[in-house]
Amino acid sequence: MRRLFPLFLFGAAATALVFLVLPVIAIFLRVPPGTLLRQLDDPVARDAILVSLRTNAAAEALLLVLGTPAAYLLATRRFRGRSVAVTLVELPLVLPPAVAGIGLLAAFGRTGLLGTSLPFTQGAVVVAIAFVASPFYVRAGIAAFESLDRTLVDAARTLGASPARVFFRVALPLARSGLAAGAALAFARGLGEFGATIMFAGSLQGVTQTLPLAVYAQFARDFDVALAVGALLVAVSFALLLVVKWAPSVSTSTFRFAPSVSR
Amino acid sequence: MRALGLLLGLLALGGSKPTVYAAASLTEILPRLQPAARYQFAGSDQLAYQIQQGARADLFLAASPKYPARLYAQGLVERPVVFATNTMVLIVPRANPARIRSVYGLKRKGIKLVIGAKGLPIGDYTRKLLANLDLTSVLANVVSEEDDVKLVVAKVALGEADAGFVYRTDVKPVRTNVYRIALPAKGQPTVAYEGAVVRAGSHKTEARALLRRLLSPAGRTRLRDAGFGLP
């Protein structure tokens, strides 16, 4: 029994690993790498790459500009309803993307609450991506700002720095790596966004057809293109994951002050 | 291990009901015609692809002869038979925000037109129809290409799109939300539905019975009442 347990652990771990890695490897083994690369030159793939880059860049910018102050506020202030606010921020994380799509239509659709003309535009793709990806960034941001060395912030304040100056000159640089990791995760999630996009923005090559939408549109029509786009997404996602894993180790503050007595 | 095998077997067999892979435009009529079947509704091109990949279908009912013919040539299905025809219509939301009165009204700039994707039967029929009517320029107004006809219907019924090309039979279920605009007969492509029994299916007898039922007088009455044409 004593010898069996480690064996069981190894067996289970190996099975899990093979199960998780096999589909990913299969994408690359199905057709030769040369063919895979050539398929990326297909107009559908090329357009999807451009659409994905543009919409994800815009969504990421939106996240940084609005998400960073939001995370800072939620991390540094204690107010009534704060935990509710944090929970609401995390809601898209557990929401099925199809529900997000329906919700976005009900809110921003032409016949929705706000009655905008967003659907079917690239703006709709940006909104869908920002909606589903924001929790990844804001959560990481809250964690990063919460783990800041309070003594540094307090020191800046006692030395006469305004709250804005503290945010920009102390908190932001110190939280940099945590924020970067969150941004990379949010980007990875946004790049893979499918359900909310196809429902809210539709799918049109060169306009709203992002990489995941192109995989779906092509899989029954041109499987090689779908594979190539899939392979590209695997490669980019893997690279982003590496960034997330390594970013925290590139610490921004190399020296630490001794904790203050009050803590 | 034996329990796992049994479980997988159960999942695979799933009782004595045949599994029917059917074009999305058959969503309303099939369960009424034969409730004792499992249905998977989607674009015919996707269904054909899944059958090629070994999906456990017993009967394939497509909105075009193209895919059954392809699977037949590959030896995956028995000889296909035509069981219905259909006509195309243009639908607009009840509120008709773009004030479209005929297919020629689609030429106006800024109209949000939703159509089926290329390769999907309704998508190919739409392109053929527009070519027949010398209206391919309206393709510039397409804001989304959907993967089955019911998604086109949904985008128009929701009021998000200004217009969409669908089958005549798609209108009835959403008639409170959309208006139907007839299309010039000279533009109509031939829309034929073909069914074929999947060779690898485990319920071929039931599949053949369902196909026969579609071709029987009772089945034809049902099809006609739903707005389909008869071959």
Image (cartoon, rainbow, N blue to C red):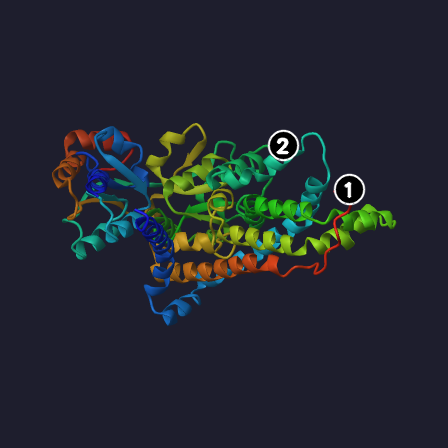
A69 relative to B26, above or below: below
Asked whether, in this view, residue A150 is left or right of residue A107, the answer is right
Q: Quadrant of residue B29?
A: top left
Estimate the x, y position of residue A166 in percent, counting from the top left.
79, 50
For this rendering, which residue is in front, B119 or B134?
A: B119
Q: Is residue A48 visible?
A: no
| Residue type highlighted by circle 2 | Val
User: Disc 2, disc 1: CB below 8 Å?
Assistant: no
Residue ranking furthest to the front: A2
Q: Position of residue A233 (x, y in %)?
A: 46, 59
- Where is residue B95 drawn, in percent x and y? 52, 32
Say whether disc 2 or disc 1 marks the residue closer to the N-terminus: 2
Q: Quadrant of the N terminus of chain B?
A: top left
In which quadrant of the rendered view does residue B62 lie? top left
Q: Residues within 10 Å of mark 1 (few under 14, many from 20)?
A: few
Check disc 2: other Cα within 10 Å, few if <14, some if 14-19, many if 20+.
few
Residue A262 numbered mark, or none: 1
Q: Which residue is mark 2?
A: A84
Secondary structure category for the residue under label 2: helix
Amino acid bearing label 1: Ser
Residue depicted at x 82% and y 50%: A155
Mark 2 or 1: in front is 1
Chain letter of disc 2 in the image: A
Say which quadrant the C terminus of chain B sits in: top left
Q: Is residue B113 left or right of B66 when viewed as pictured? A: right
Q: Foreground residue, A206 or B173?
A: A206
Q: Residue at x 34, y 59 (%)?
A: A223
Camera-side residue: A148 or A34? Answer: A148
Q: CA distance from mark 2 to mark 1?
A: 29 Å
**Which residue is depicted at the point 64% across and 33% down?**
A83
The chain containing the residue under callout 1 comes to A
Looking at the image, the residue that sits furthest to the left is B205
